[in-house]
Amino acid sequence: MQHFNPEKALVAIRREFGEHGGVAPSIERSSTFTVMHPGTMPEIFAGTLGHEQDGCYLYSRHFNPTVHLLACDLAAMDGMEFGICTASGISAIACAILQICKAGDHIVASNTVYGGTHALFQDMLPSMGVTTTFVDPTDTAGFEAAIRDNTKAIYVEALGNPTLKVADIPSLADIAHRHGAKLVVDNTFTPAMITPSQMGADVVVYSMTKYINGASDVVAGAILGTREFIFELMDLHTGRVMLLGPTMDPRTAFDIHQRLPHLPLRMREHSRRALAMAERLHELKAPVTYPGLPSHPQHELYASMVNEGYGYGGMLTLDCGTREKAEEVMEMLQNREDFGYIAVSLGYFDTLISCSGSSTSSEIPEEEQRDMGLSPGLLRIAIGYTGDLEDRIAQIESVCRDTGLIG
Ligand code: PLP
């Protein structure tokens, strides 16, 4: 399989300097942009002049120089032609899907997706005439079997939230393309580590709220794809991002842009620590799931898709059986050991722990949670990189012992 080097791709693109030669780019906060001659404005509206080739900006809900810079760097890092940033991950997902699917269309989606995405597909899109069939992401043939004449998109998370099931991106891309559909991949759990564009994905979406920003201080998203697709999203008449308007603020774009260069470093450290912890817990026979463990059913598939040197990611799960046991474990991890925080989200430098079934996946009905392999006691642990690793391992080991998760 073709592996990609996101660090090389990032440095290979144009560098933007601040207006006084600063090593950091300037923040362009204008919401609107002047033109030197009145005749220019109609040309910008007609699309014969644009920001890319002519440096002509119009209005910041359309394109903004600072936000555009982040989108370009992100697209380069992901081996994609072009991108657009949005105000949140869920707006990126909704706009991308609504651009591809119109009333009467159909989606085949993984049943292991973020709860908000599940709600969008299951509860909201049907009111717009778009229906979804959910399939276990490990059942690649099931995606093909679920395709109908009106299927326009296959939708998966590269590493599924929260069960950590792995989508076979190359095979799903092949299936989608044979049936005239687009493969849309949410790569939120595995940025820089997995590069879906190199395996045939047509559109990549991100919640940048998570690893890409890495500081749990902004909510942000992105859509990456072909230049044609991104311009469709920004079309003045029908563009879902242009007309639904989930615009990113340039100050947010600047903050995330400053953190993008160290994303690969951070991802490798999240992986190194999560692997060490998962190996120790597995050795002790704790109910741990981690794609880096040979016991993970899709360990080989994941290894075949990950870029060299990135490991297996920062997410692991611990199945405590019941919600009560999960809460006991979380309580001790946070309040006795200072191991991390009881909080949703991921990608922070400190560890974040949540019980998915009753939090970020609570939109998914209980029966469907069972079908997707989500136990009510599943703890999703987003391993951070603060503290001494051996101390951290000792902390989680002692909580597992004291709560009876290990003998
Ligand atoms: N995709 C995944 C995999 C997520 O975990 C989340 C949020 O938890 C989202 C998308 C939505 O992102 P945001 O909260 O930035 O809208």
Image (cartoon, grey):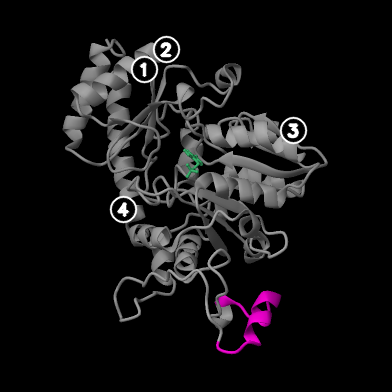
Q: Residues within 10 Å of mark 3 (few under 14, many from 20)?
A: some
Whole-angstrom CA distance, mark 1 to mark 2, is 6 Å
Whether pointer 3 and pointer 2 mark residues with C-beta atoms closer than 8 Å, the reply is no
Q: Does the magenta segment cover residue 319?
A: no
Q: Which of the numbered marks, if any, corresponds to residue 322?
A: 2
Q: Is residue 42 magenta?
A: yes
As helix, strand or loop, the secondary structure at mark 3 comes to helix
Residue located farthest toward the bottom when viewing the structure as drawn: 37
Specify the amino acid type for callout 4: Leu
Tell me if residue 301 can be seen.
Answer: yes
For disc 4, the marked residue is 265
Q: Nearer the viewer, residue 103 or 177?
A: 103
Q: Look at mark 1 in the image and give the residue it sits on.
A: 326
Residue at 50% from the left image edge and 45% from the top image edge:
305
- Looking at the rendering, the stretch of residues picked out in magenta corresponds to 36-51
In the rendered structure, which disc, 3 or 2, sits on the residue that comes first in sequence?
A: 3
**Residue 214: where, in percent of width, then height?**
35, 48
Distance of label 1 from label 4 (alpha carbons)? 31 Å
Label 3 vs label 2: CA separation? 33 Å
Q: Would you say 368 lies left or right of 26 here?
A: right
Mark 1 or mark 4, which is nearer to you? 1
Q: For the residue with label 3, is its CB less than 8 Å from the closest atom of ligand 1?
A: no
Residue 168's label in the rendered image is: none
| Sooner in the amino-acid sequence: mark 4 or mark 3 | 3
Cα distance in 3D space between marks 1 and 3: 35 Å
Q: Which residue is mark 3?
A: 146
Quarter-wise, where is residue 58 in the image? bottom right
Q: Earlier in the sequence, mark 2 or mark 4?
A: 4
